[in-house]
Image: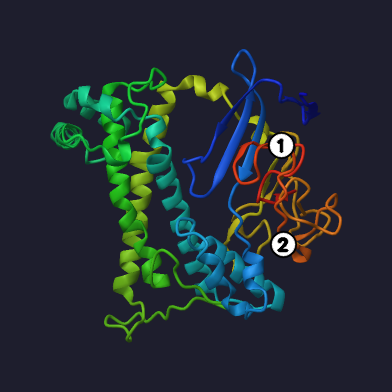
Amino acid sequence: MSNQYQTQGYTVNDAGRRLIVDPITRIEGHMRCEVNIDEQNVITNAVSCGTMFRGLEIILQGRDPRDAWAFVERICGVCTGVHALASVYAIEDAIGIQVPDNANIIRNIMLATLWCHDHLVHFYQLAGMDWIDVLNALKADPRATSQLAQSLSAWPMSSPGYFFDVQNRLKKFVDGGQLGIFRNGYWGHPQYKLSPEANLMGFAHYLEALDFQREIVKIHTIFGGKNPHPNWIVGGMPCAINLDQSGAVGAINMERLNLVQSIITRTADFINNVMVPDALAIGQFNKAWSQIGTGLSDKCVLSYGAFPDIANDFSQQSLLMPGGAVINGDFKNVMPVDLADPQQIQEFVDHAWYRYPDDRLGRHPFDGITDPWYNPGDVKGSDTHIQQLNEQERYSWIKAPR
């Protein structure tokens, strides 16, 4: 029996053919998606399932709050740092600690580093192969590829000889018969729209982005000691700064700060002259995709904000990346959000594998409960081998923030 209902201007109907993708490989993490499509291949119902129970709150029970950042950070080596920083912010807010200006600046630099790093990783390493037909790049003319690249930006690595070398490396790789991470690509599929030259340019930049990751994370090693899982601390940052030429033992001197500035400059250069032009070029070849998708993402958006320009001030005036809520697609009126107000921010578990005293009511994160209760309900398959979820009941390990 099919289910149909209205939500925010959409009609959701699960009567059509069910498609399941598990795992979703374009993200870091554990995610499953099930969708229903009608006879025109239009998605009429979508179910997103977080398949991993993390239990961070349970892990932290009984531990020293000052150590919380070190535990939560290690749940993931790709989104490294963000859980730790959120933990540090929470402890400082709870006990009223004021951090120094320099500590706030360093935190912002480290977060911005991860922000840029994640965009590069997602665009090239995670999603790039959905747009770039690697094998088709072997048909490209390196001279025409050079002309295309130079028409998009002044990036220096755009000569015909450079693209010839990249193409030759790819040819040897393919001729060897061991494609490695490229083995299971849908190469040659008609939905690949890029020209051979655009594919060669994209593949070359894929390799450059992979190599550049080693550079950008050096900022974390300078300020945080290592990457992944750089060090943080409640009340500041665990890195002394001495502007003398030699510097004290273990302290950051001008040489290290100049290196940080150099990496920031090169990162901005790579994004502005490689990633952004590539995104625009891919968009030109795939214009139809602008009419596909969005769903509720252009209806309801919630952002907590980031990068306080003024230390200890998380007001909208201080945040370089403002927070707020977009309701019913009205992007002209971003509603302010008070994160401390239990009436404005709540987490719901009525469709997640957790229990509250009353599952119908949400709870503010300050009052949150993490009580795992794996109860798939009436699913196709078994509890340990689910063939199809039942979204009318519980279907995910992720709470719903609203």
Q: What residue type is labelled 1?
A: Asn
Mark 2 nearby-residue class (10 Å; few <14, some 14–19, many ≥20): some
Q: Quadrant of residue 128?
A: top left
Q: Say which element carries label 1.
A: loop
Mark 1, residue position: 390
Q: Quadrant of residue 144?
A: top left
Q: Which mark is residue 327?
A: none
Q: What residue type is labelled 2?
A: Thr
What's the distance in space between the residues labelled 2 and 1, CA to CA? 22 Å
Q: Which of 386 and 326 is in front in this view?
A: 386
Residue 387, image x, y percentages: 61, 35
Q: Which residue is located at x 14 percent, y 34 percent?
A: 168
Q: Nearer the viewer, residue 119 or 45?
A: 45
Q: Which mark is residue 370?
A: 2
| Front of the two marks 2 and 1 | 1
Quarter of the picture containing the N terminus is top right
Q: Which residue is located at x 35 percent, y 57 percent?
A: 216
Residue 154, image x, y percentages: 27, 37
Whether residue 35 is visible here, answered yes or no, is yes
Q: Earlier in the sequence, mark 2 or mark 1?
A: 2
Q: Nearer the viewer, residue 250 or 147?
A: 250
Residue 232 against residue 336 in the figure, above or below: below
Residue 379, image x, y percentages: 70, 37
Mark 1 nearby-residue class (10 Å; few <14, some 14–19, many ≥20): some
Is the image coloured rainbow, by chain, by secondary structure, or in one colour?
rainbow
Q: Nearer the viewer, residue 163 or 356?
A: 356
Looking at the image, which residue sits at the far top?
A: 39
Q: Do the residues labelled 2 and 1 touch (CB within 8 Å)?
A: no
Q: Which residue is located at x 41 percent, y 63 percent?
A: 228
Q: Say which element carries label 2.
A: loop
Q: Which residue is located at x 38 percent, y 64 percent?
A: 219
Whether residue 312 is visible here, answered yes or no, is no
